[in-house]
Image (cartoon, rainbow, N blue to C red):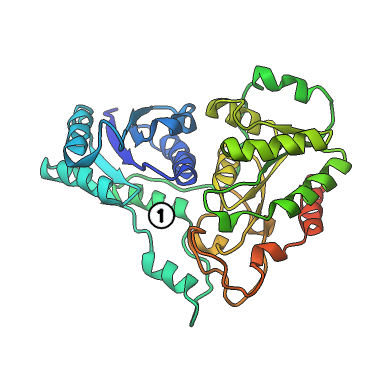
Amino acid sequence: MPTKKIIVLRFSAMGDVAMVASVLKELVEQNADIEIVMVSRKAFAPFFNTIDRLSFHTIDPKGEHKGFWGLYKLFKALRHYQPYAIADLHDNIRSRVISAFFRLSGTKIKRIDKGRAEKKALTRKHHKQLVQLKPTVERYAYVFRALHFKIKLSHQLQRQQTPIPANAKPWFDAPGVKRIGIAPFAQHIYKVYPLVQMEEVIAGLNKLGYEIFIFGGGKKEAETALQWEQKFEQVHNTIGLFSLTEELNLIAHLDVMLSMDSSGMHMASLMGIPVVSIWGPTHPYAGFLGYGQSINDCIQIDHPNRPNSIYGNKPCLCGVKACIDLIEPEVVIQKIKSKLENG
């Protein structure tokens, strides 16, 4: 059977790229005649390690592929794959420039429709249209359908079988213990549940006897996680201790993940782990709920000014106190407890 190569463009952000991986898994399973060339940042390559018939090609937008001539150099390298089509799942200046080069050479191009107008209607203050928009993963899938490939997303979590990282094995010695991942940080501060309240959540979960793993962030976040590790007997900091591949392997052995509207949610989805998520100025209706996750597991406050942001880069407009601050720690604890007991 002749093979058609599709070059897929999605360079950032971390969660969006992880969502692409969830879609590509199902795409290759349903189309035996295609190969994928995934173009993204080097750091995100582990998201695609287990996908059959997929090659990863790195873009270095701050170095080798910076500017117009850097993108032209990338185009020349990608041209050697002799692609059947280009699937632009990013729709930014860089992806448009690369697509334009391929269009001039006669290659078929299809680009994501991000639904900007309907997202604006969802987040505006007046005459807000609070309706569920098309999930981002379905927007990705539509691009492949437009290229005449069949893809029907299951929207089901598929737990991945992975080895426990060697350094983490002592944390898994106790049989029958429920293990919770917590990704308490996010790129934008307005999406972060107040750390004082998060500590109350951690204290409550620790008291219930659950094993807790803190994920995500850099040096500053690692300091916070280390303080929690020292304060609570069953809390473990993972920040800075594992590669992304090892992190994913570790997540695959959790029972549930607690996350903001952030990449932690999408990494858990990729490994087939259910997520309880906390939402502030953003909203799952915008289409960024983790693949296979349930809106019933989203914790959020009802307010006429929510949502007011798609990406969480704008402060809450709900009044003196931000809407995410109004979520009581006990609500989060009970939601996780119920999820672990009832599935």
Q: Position of residue 306 (x, y in %)?
A: 57, 71
Question: In this view of the protein, which residue sits in the foreground, 19 or 180?
Answer: 180
Q: Residue at x 56, y 39 (%)?
A: 267
Image height check: is 96 above or below 213? below
Q: Quadrant of residue 179?
A: top right
Pick out the residue farthest to the bottom.
127
Q: Position of residue 323 (x, y in %)?
A: 65, 67
As drawn, is 181 to the left or to the right of 140? right
Image height check: is 214 above or below 154? above
Q: Residue at x 34, y 44 (%)?
A: 149
Instruction: Report whether residue 216 is seen.
Output: no
Q: Residue at x 71, y 66 (%)?
A: 326
Q: Position of residue 269 (x, y in %)?
A: 58, 42
Question: Under tag 1, what secondary structure?
Answer: helix
Q: Quadrant of residue 78?
A: top left
Q: Position of residue 330 (x, y in %)?
A: 82, 57
- Image quarter (top left, top right, bottom left or bottom right) of the N terminus: top left
As drawn, is 22 to the left or to the right of 86? right
Question: In this view of the protein, which residue sits in the foreground, 151 or 281?
Answer: 281
Give the class, few, some or many, for how many residues have Cα within 10 Å of label 1's Cα (few <14, many ≥20): some
Image height check: is 42 above or below 24? above
Q: Amino acid at mark 1?
A: Arg
As drawn, is 302 to the left or to the right of 111? right
Count of all numbered marks drawn on residues in the image: 1
Q: Residue at x 79, y 33 (%)?
A: 230
Label 1, on which residue?
139
Image height check: is 296 above or below 207? below
Instruction: Report whether residue 183 is seen.
Output: yes
